[in-house]
Amino acid sequence: MNQSEMELMLNGHGLTTATIFYHMPDYHSVLQTFLWQEYDIAPDLPKLHGFLKFWEDELEGPIHSVQYAHQHLIKPGEWKRVDGVFRLH
């Protein structure tokens, strides 16, 4: 079942951004970059590790290095459920 981004954030996922530096398959002295973003759970980052495993198993460009950042966009205590809305003119 696919969850919405809001549901993922409320369940503890944060936005993970990874910059993957890899060697070109035909020109090993040339480095390219690939930017990857997904909602993931820190500190284990299972989705990022799964993507990197897929890359190593299925793609030809060997990975040189990976830099990543992880940020919770909604933290506990910053979100409250609202049961009603009052309008003031």
Image: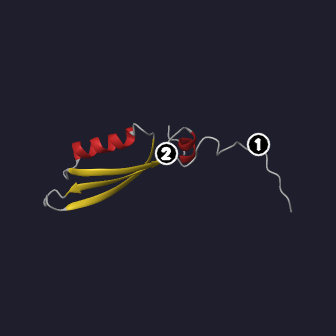
* Foreground pick, 58 / 80: 80
Rendered image: mark on residue 1: none
Residue at image position (17%, 62%) is 30
Horizontal relation, residue 11 to residue 87: left or right: left
The color scheme shown is: secondary structure
Q: Secondary structure at mark 2?
A: strand
Tell me residue 52's x, y (percent).
29, 44
Q: Secondary structure at mark 1?
A: loop
Residue neighbourhood size for the residue with mark 1, other residues' Cα within 10 Å, grouped as few (<14), some (14–19), many (≥20): few
Residue at image position (54%, 44%) is 9
Residue at image position (69%, 43%) is 80
For label 2, the residue is 14
Quadrant that contains the C terminus: bottom right
The kind of residue tagged 1 is: Asp
Mark 2 touches mark 1? (CB < 8 Å): no
* Foreground pick, 47 / 41: 41
Cα distance, mark 2 to mark 1?
26 Å
Tell me residue 26's x, y (percent).
13, 59
For label 1, the residue is 83
- Of circles 2 and 1, the one toward us is 2
Q: Quadrant of residue 51?
A: top left
Q: Quadrant of residue 81?
A: top right
Residue neighbourhood size for the residue with mark 2, other residues' Cα within 10 Å, grouped as few (<14), some (14–19), many (≥20): many
The kind of residue tagged 2 is: Gly
User: Vertical placement of 23 versus 51: above or below?
Assistant: below
